[in-house]
Every structure is written in C-alpha cells, then in structure tokens.
Amino acid sequence: MALKVSEVARLARVSIRTLHHYDEIELVRPSGRSAAGYRLYAQKDLERLQQVLFFRNSSSRWMKSSESSAAQISTWVRRFGCNDSCSPSEPFASRL
C-alpha cells in the first residue's frame, strides 16, 4: 500500500514541507512516484520516517536544538536504527 505525501504527513503528524525536505536531503526518500509525480511512500519508508522522528524527538532531550541536525539524525538512524528485519512497535499505518 503506497501513501501520498499528504497522507504520510497526516499519519506522522509532520508537515508536508518536512517530508519534502527529508526527501531533498535524502534522509527519508519515497520509494516511488505516481504518474502525476506525487511522492509515494511504502511501508519501509514509513518505518524509516518513524526512526528519523524518534531520533529527532529524542535528541531534544540531551542536545541544544541547534545541534540536532539532519546529518546527526541520519548518522544515528544508520548506526542504531532498525534494519529490514525488524519493525517499529507502532507503525504509522496502524493509525489508518
């Protein structure tokens, strides 16, 4: 089941602009595009987004907001994030 950016934004409670930014900096890339050019997110993309948001929100507890960069979050996701064999405890898709 592929979701458009507006649907993912609603489920993840982030702005569409945030998702566009994550795509531009290659932090969370959608798996595909529709014929009309809409970003389409698969389940694995939602899991990656959930990891990114976890680290973004967690970092605010021990770092100044100016230090919490997308590059640092990307490093944390690569180092500590879930791989393809695990799934998050509450995937966004369960909110549908």
Image (spheres, rainbow, N blue to C red):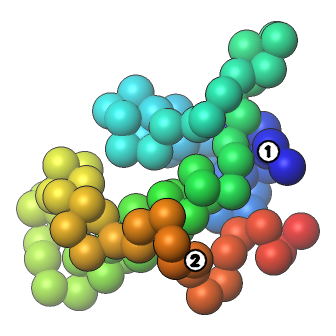
Q: Nearer the viewer, residue 42 or 7?
A: 42
Is 62 placed left or right of 96 in the picture? left
Q: Secondary structure at mark 2?
A: loop
In the rendered structure, find residue 49 and report the number of the disc placed on it. Answer: none
Q: Residue at x 81, y 76 (%)?
A: 94
- Going by the image, does 29 lie left or right of 74? right
CB under 8 Å between discs 1 and 2:
no
In the depicted view, which residue is nearer to us: 79 or 37?
A: 79
The secondary element bearing badge 1 is classed as strand
**Residue 53 appears left or right of 62:** right
Q: Is residue 10 above or below residue 80?
A: above
State which tag comes first along the sequence, 1 or 2.
Answer: 1
Residue matched to label 1 = 3
Dot 1 amino acid type: Leu
Among the 4 quarters of the image, the one containing residue 60 = bottom left
Q: Quadrant of the C terminus?
A: bottom right
Q: Residues within 10 Å of mark 1 (few under 14, many from 20)?
A: some
Vertically, is 22 above or below 92?
above
**Residue displayed at 58% across by 51% down:** 45
Q: Which residue is mark 2?
A: 87
- Residue type pointed to by label 2: Ser
Distance from disc 1 to disc 2, alpha carbons, whole Å, reads 18 Å
Figure quadrant of residue 30: top right
Count of picture labels: 2
Provide residue 63's location: percent of width, then percent of height.
12, 77
Foreground pick, 62 / 73: 73
Horizontal and vertical percent position of residue 16: 62, 41
Left or right: 58 in relation to 50: left
Evaluate whether residue 71 shows in this view.
yes
In the rendered image, residue 18, in percent from the top left (x then y), is placed at 49, 44
Foreground mark, 1 or 2, reads: 2
> Is residue 51 something that shows in the picture?
no
